[in-house]
Image (cartoon, rainbow, N blue to C red):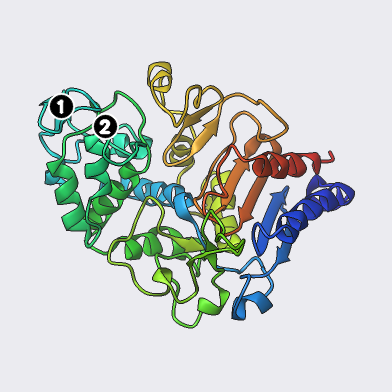
Amino acid sequence: MTGGGLSSKRLVRLRDLLNRHVDTGFVPGVVTVLARHGHVHVEAVGRLAFEGAGSGTPMAADTICRLGSMTKPVVSACVMTLVEDGTLRLDDPVDDLLPELADMTVLADPHGPLDATVAAQRPITLRDLLVGTLGTGMVPAEPGTVPIADALDALDYASPDEWIRQLGALPLVHQPGERWMYDVAANVTGVLVARATGMSFNDAIRERVCDPLGMRDTAFSVAAGNTDRLATAYAQDDAPTGEPVVEDGPDGRFSRPRAFESGGGGLVSTADDFLAFASALLAGGVHHGERVLSRPAVTLMTSDHLTPEQKAVSGFWPGYFDAIGWGFGMSVRTRRTHLGPSVGSYGWPGFYGTAWYNDPAEDMTAIVMMQRAHAGDQRLPMWHDIWTAVYQSIDD
């Protein structure tokens, strides 16, 4: 048995599984980190890219990856520091800092015309932003079939102020508090944090989360001189010739400062950095003996805040919330359904195949880093196999 109550024999299964995904050409490389009882185990296989300079650089715990939606929990932690110091309050309306979202209207029919609306029954609160119940968000639909979906897709991300102005000019899809909707809330939260702190969203996260946790490589763009550690991101589908398609390379959009710092999915980070974040949450807000968040703040972040009524009408597919709930920017496991995270586990995946979960019952953090679009889809057999291999490795 290796440290942390993990079986060295069974960890070979995890490494073999990761190697298979590299050998089949699904991704050029992948890193997993398992931390348990104070011991850290890293499995890194493959390279940063299929082609170019990255094809000669091994994946490692300090490889920089685009987090995608794994950004959301970090944003929530930043917000909770503002709640703790009294700058923000969870149940206050956001109207003062986001007047663009005051006195909103709501679609009479979520699939109907944009000019058929009713008044919002109450203001949007900070809690709504953190839980995703502000009344608007991702609306999956074929282009041209649902007016509000087309309007949300057309929002201009040239600047935070222009984006929030355009969002506020649209009606909400549902009444605030009625149901959970994905993604938009985290971007709204980013605008709110910037205005509340009087600094850029990136600087606020750096000052309040990253610097206290020593997360040197976590930001909305890669620092100059570090792009040689940035893994290449690939599109979901290969070219007709069977070759992987580069979606974003080391010299792409994350290699320079972003005009819109997206709370929904804009951070880059490393397995090392994210382990510091995850470990602090698992320790109740403490990192290397220093308190970064209060224990009550961590409990709020990692508790299920959705009601049965909200779950019944929410989610990406029917039954989505049968075994999970939603905390502040992350899912919370409410029922164990397979050889994977225990009840009370929390975390979230990202667009390019990053994923993270803390399992308090097992005193364990699991982190996966890869860079292929939609590789983090929870329905893929790959993810079932990875979490099965992780939990099979527990040996105490």
CA gap between label 1 and label 2 equals 9 Å
Q: Give the secondary structure at mark 1.
A: loop
Q: In the rendering, which numbered label is found on residue 135?
A: 2
Q: Residues within 10 Å of mark 2 (few under 14, many from 20)?
A: many
Q: Quadrant of the C terminus?
A: top right
Q: Nearer the viewer, residue 264 or 46?
A: 46
Please, is residue 279 above or below residue 159 in the view?
A: above
Disc 1 and disc 2 in contact, CB within 8 angstroms = yes
Q: Position of residue 11 (x, y in %)?
A: 82, 50
Q: Residues within 10 Å of mark 1 (few under 14, many from 20)?
A: some
Please, is residue 312 above or below residue 88 in the view?
A: above
Q: In the rendering, which numbered label is found on residue 158?
A: none
The residue under label 1 is 120
Q: Is residue 68 left or right of residue 81?
A: right
Q: Nearer the viewer, residue 160 or 81?
A: 160
Q: Position of residue 301 (x, y in %)?
A: 45, 39
Please, is residue 357 above or below residue 223 in the view?
A: above
Q: Give the secondary structure at mark 2.
A: loop
The residue under the point 72% across, 48% down is: 36
- Amino acid at dot 2: Gly
Q: Nearer the viewer, residue 183 or 151?
A: 151
Q: Is residue 339 left or right of residue 109?
A: right
Q: Is residue 141 left or right of residue 96?
A: right
Q: Position of residue 38 (x, y in %)?
A: 71, 52
The residue under the point 17% across, 31% down is: 123
Q: Is residue 142 visible?
A: yes
In which quarter of the view is residue 88 placed? Answer: top left
Q: Earlier in the sequence, mark 1 or mark 2?
A: 1
- Amino acid at dot 1: Ala
The residue under the point 71% across, 66% down is: 46
Q: Is residue 283 visible?
A: no
Q: Position of residue 222 (x, y in %)?
A: 45, 72
